[in-house]
Amino acid sequence: MPNWDYPCSEPVDITIDSWAAGSIAISGEPTSTLSVEVLPSRRTGNAEELLAEVEVSFEDGQLYVHGPRPGAFHRNRGLDLTIKAPAGSGCAAKTASADLTCVGEIGALTAHTASGDVTAAAVTGDVTVHTASGDVMLQEAGGDVSFATASGDIQLVRVAGETQARSASGDVTIGQCGGSLSVNTASGDVRVSAAQAGKVHLNSASGDLRVGVVPGIAVYLDLSSTSGDVKSQLDPAGDEEPADAAIEIKCRTLSGDITITKAA
């Protein structure tokens, strides 16, 4: 099966274009060799023509991978792409139904998919993901995060920078956010486990909104729901909101419930 190896010990920029079906796995690890391997996703069917159309090139720190033409894919046929690169390498990928998985240390991530899921462990820089129905799971991001999806769910465990997320019917779940946060959904629920700084602005039509606030932080609350319940479990600060609040929480929903709690 096709395999490419290049001597390389410094982080590279990876560009993956037109990878319609199958899977993509990127590993950022301590290595002195940049390796690319392509295998058929399933043993059934003749995949030689697909493999023959794969193009791989590496020059001046840029790895470029181009998949077979979109019309070459048929039902139950795809290719699995595996790339092992030096830790800190960045990745930009475009797929249709292929899932994208990043393990190890990735420097930055940009992904555009139709129905493929995107999963990443540790990204030290910024993350941008656009998907139609695919789910997004990010363990840790050291920079800013921007996500947009129609029906996919979004899960972020820990983000150091600012976060922006847009969803139609998918749920958005965020663990710890170190910077400002903006989430807009139509019917999806939004849950933030531990907000601690900046502005937290959540908007939804029918989804429920829930925000946990790190204890000991002064908070300014601006909450509004047309027909849903609104409640705060934070300790009252008196008749006036604190002027020196470290965090501003603004939640708007039509029929959804709004709950503000103390972070565990």
Image (cartoon, rainbow, N blue to C red):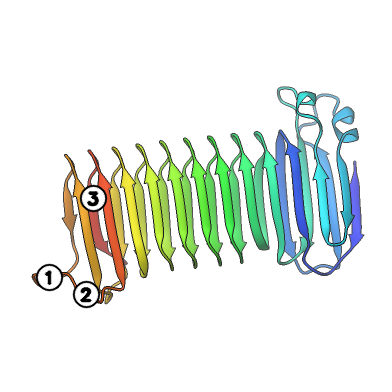
Q: Which amino acid does label 3 sit on?
A: Ile
Q: Which of marks 1 and 3 is nearer the N terminus?
A: 1
**Label 2 vs label 3, nearer the camera:** 2
Q: Which mark is residue 258?
A: 3
**Cα distance, mark 1 to mark 3?**
21 Å
Residue corresponding to mark 2: 243
Does residue 108 lie above or below 72 as drawn? below
Residue contact at pointers 2 and 1, CB within 8 angstroms: yes
Q: For the image shown, how many numbered marks are present on the structure? A: 3
Q: Determine the residue positioned at 55% across, 63% down.
A: 141
Report crowding for label 1: few under 14, some 14 to 19, many 20 or more residues within 10 A (C-alpha).
few
Q: Determine the residue positioned at 72% across, 36% down.
A: 22
The local secondary structure at tag 2 comes to loop
Q: Determine the residue positioned at 76% across, 40% down.
A: 80
- The quarter of the rendered structure image containing the N terminus is top right
Does residue 243 lie above or below 20 as drawn? below
Extreme residue toward the left, this view? 239
Residue corresponding to mark 1: 240
Q: Which amino acid does label 1 sit on?
A: Glu
- The quarter of the rendered structure image containing the C terminus is bottom left
Report crowding for label 2: few under 14, some 14 to 19, many 20 or more residues within 10 A (C-alpha).
few
Residue contact at pointers 2 and 3, CB within 8 angstroms: no
- Give the percent coordinates (x, y) of residue 199: 35, 63
Left or right: 60, with 123 as reference point: right
Q: Nearer the viewer, residue 210 or 197?
A: 197
